């Protein structure tokens, strides 16, 4: 079974994560499959909009625990980041159609899309602090640029989950709709964009990305500061606390973090 399904109806392409048995959890193989699908749709001259969705009960429940356990997480991160950059810089405008869980890497995936429509009862958040993971700099910066400093601190430091309605109020998603209305809402938005002049839409996306790039800190401009954050990310992935957090999640018990 393919990890990602790519289809197109008219000028609207859909990239669907296809691991419903794992709530579309991300692994190295899933990230690579998404990158390949992004390249395929980029070559399709008929596609004008790309919708990203998830098969089954969830949009994306985050990274597969096996992918982030200890030092393995450091191997997963480059492939995950490659996937996110591929979405952020894709020539087509992208819409995340969020239902069920969009947690951890799932919310980070939605964050790099141009638009986010969620069901009102979706479960949205980044529970990294509950596990002992430190989100890498690039994704913290994306979250700050999307929703602001205060919301980013709430999301990342508390690890709490938001409903779709709460996420819309906080600026994490653009709109929350009843579950039965998600397909129609995404269809209306994608149809509106697809009906506009492609050179204008795609040029606007590229121009806004240039603005974001100039507002952002990158590794060439702040190498020392980012190297420090990288060391903190690596320390978290190698910590005993992460193992304790994963064990507690699996055993459904409260984690006992010691800061080591």
Image: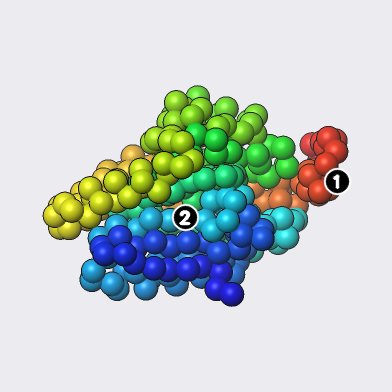
Identify which residue, 65 or 132, lies in the foreground: 65
Quarter holding the C terminus?
top right
Which disc number belongs to residue 44?
A: none
Which tag, 1 or 2, sits closer to the chain's start?
2
**Residue at image point 58% right, 38% down:** 123
**Residue at image point 49% right, 51% down:** 109
> Residue 37: in sight, yes or no?
yes
| Residue beneath disc 2 | 53
- State the image coordinates of residue 178 (x, y, percent, origin top left): 46, 36
Quarter holding the N terminus?
bottom right
Label 1, residues with CA under 10 Å away: few <14, some 14-19, many ≥20: few
Label 2, residues with CA under 10 Å away: few <14, some 14-19, many ≥20: many
**Residue at image point 73% right, 60% down:** 66
Q: Is residue 53 left or right of residue 238?
A: left
Q: Is residue 180 left or right of residue 200?
A: right
| Residue beneath disc 1 | 251
* Whole-number angstrom distance, CA of label 1 to CA of label 2: 29 Å
- State the image coordinates of residue 70 (x, y, percent, origin top left): 75, 56
- State the image coordinates of residue 181 (x, y, percent, origin top left): 41, 41
Q: Is residue 230 left or right of residue 72?
A: left
> Residue 228: in sight, yes or no?
no
Q: Is residue 105 left or right of residue 191?
A: right
- State the image coordinates of residue 44 (x, y, percent, origin top left): 28, 72
């Amino acid at each position: 079974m393919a990890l990602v399904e790519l289809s197109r109806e008219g000028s609207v392409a859909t990239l669907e994560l296809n691991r419903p048995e794992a709530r579309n959890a991300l692994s190295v193989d899933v990230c690579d499959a998404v990158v390949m699908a992004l390249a395929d749709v980029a070559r399709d001259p008929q596609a004008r909009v790309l919708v990203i969705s998830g098969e089954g009960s969830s949009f994306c429940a985050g990274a597969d625990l096996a992918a982030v356990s200890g030092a393995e997480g450091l191997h997963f991160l480059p492939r995950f980041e490659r996937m996110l950059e591929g979405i952020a810089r894709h020539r087509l405008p992208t819409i995340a159609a969020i239902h069920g869980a969009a947690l951890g890497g799932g919310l980070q995936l939605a964050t790099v899309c141009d638009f986010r429509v969620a069901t009102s009862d979706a479960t949205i958040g980044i529970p990294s602090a509950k596990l002992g993971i430190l989100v890498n700099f690039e994704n913290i910066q994306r979250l700050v640029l999307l929703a602001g400093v205060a919301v980013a601190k709430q999301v990342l430091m508390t690890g709490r989950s938001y409903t779709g309605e709460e996420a819309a109020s906080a600026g994490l998603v653009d709109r929350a709709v009843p579950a039965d209305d998600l397909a129609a809402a995404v269809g209306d938005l994608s149809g509106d964009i697809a009906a506009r002049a492609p050179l204008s839409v795609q040029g606007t996306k590229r121009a806004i990305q240039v603005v974001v790039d100039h507002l952002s800190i990158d590794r060439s401009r702040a190498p020392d500061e980012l190297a420090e954050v990288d060391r903190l990310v690596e320390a978290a992935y190698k910590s005993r606390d992460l193992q304790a957090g994963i064990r507690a999640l699996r055993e459904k018990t409260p984690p006992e973090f010691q800061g080591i």
